[in-house]
Image (spheres, rainbow, N blue to C red):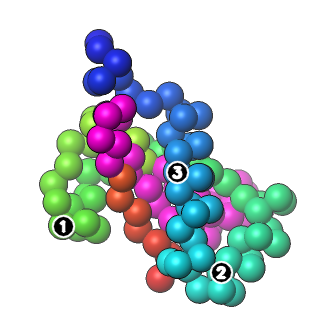
Amino acid sequence: MSEKNQKLAPDEAIDIAYDIFLEMAPENLDPADIMLFNLQFEERGAVELVETADNWNEEIGVLIDPDEYAEVWIGLVNEQDVMDDTFAKFLISHRVEEREYHIVWKE
């Protein structure tokens, strides 16, 4: 597999998503959500690579190949370690060149 088609390592996908999240959150989340995230992230925060859903076309209006993208969720987990407050869902292409991403923000 060439580097161009190689899948992102989980840590790399998580790092990319988290960096973009920190940069774009102030423009896309309510101030109350940003405060909640900042106050709770150390204890309950999670940035997780999940199986890429096949219904992104419903979110972004474009059909995608789930094998070509990594999906990362950023949010807070509850006592059962389940993410119950999701601030952003990222879809990040595996392509090194022309890295493409889509974000669904908490409404």
Q: Is residue 46 left or right of residue 7?
A: right
Task: State the separation of the CA atoms marked 2 and 3.
Answer: 18 Å
Q: Quadrant of residue 4?
A: top left
User: Mark 2 highlights which residue?
Assistant: 33
Q: Is residue 65 above or below residue 83?
A: above
Along the viewing direction, whichever of 94 and 65 lies nearer the viewer: 94
**Residue 63, percent from left and from top:** 15, 54
Instruction: Name which of mark 3 and mark 1 comes first in the sequence.
Output: 3
Task: Report the number of discs.
Answer: 3
Task: State the separation of the CA atoms marked 3 and 1.
Answer: 21 Å
Q: Secondary structure at mark 3?
A: helix
Q: Secondary structure at mark 2?
A: helix
Residue 10 visible in the current orientation = yes
Q: Is residue 89 left or right of residue 83?
A: left
- Residue at 28 percent across and 68 percent down: it is 59
Residue 17's disc is 3
Instruction: Name which of mark 2 and mark 3 comes first in the sequence.
Output: 3
User: Mark 1 highlights which residue?
Assistant: 61
Q: Residues within 10 Å of mark 2 (few under 14, many from 20)?
A: some
Q: Is residue 107 left or right of residue 86?
A: left
Residue extending farthest front: 97
Residue 74 colored in magenta in the image = yes
- Amino acid type of disc 2? Asp
Q: Residues within 10 Å of mark 3 (few under 14, many from 20)?
A: many
Q: Are marks 2 and 3 in contact (CB under 8 Å)?
A: no
**Residue 40, percent from left and from top:** 80, 68
**Residue 27, percent from left and from top:** 53, 78
Which range is magenta?
72-100
- Amino acid type of disc 1? Gly
Q: Quadrant of residue 93?
A: top left
Instruction: Name which of mark 2 and mark 1 comes first in the sequence.
Output: 2
Q: Residues within 10 Å of mark 1 (few under 14, many from 20)?
A: few
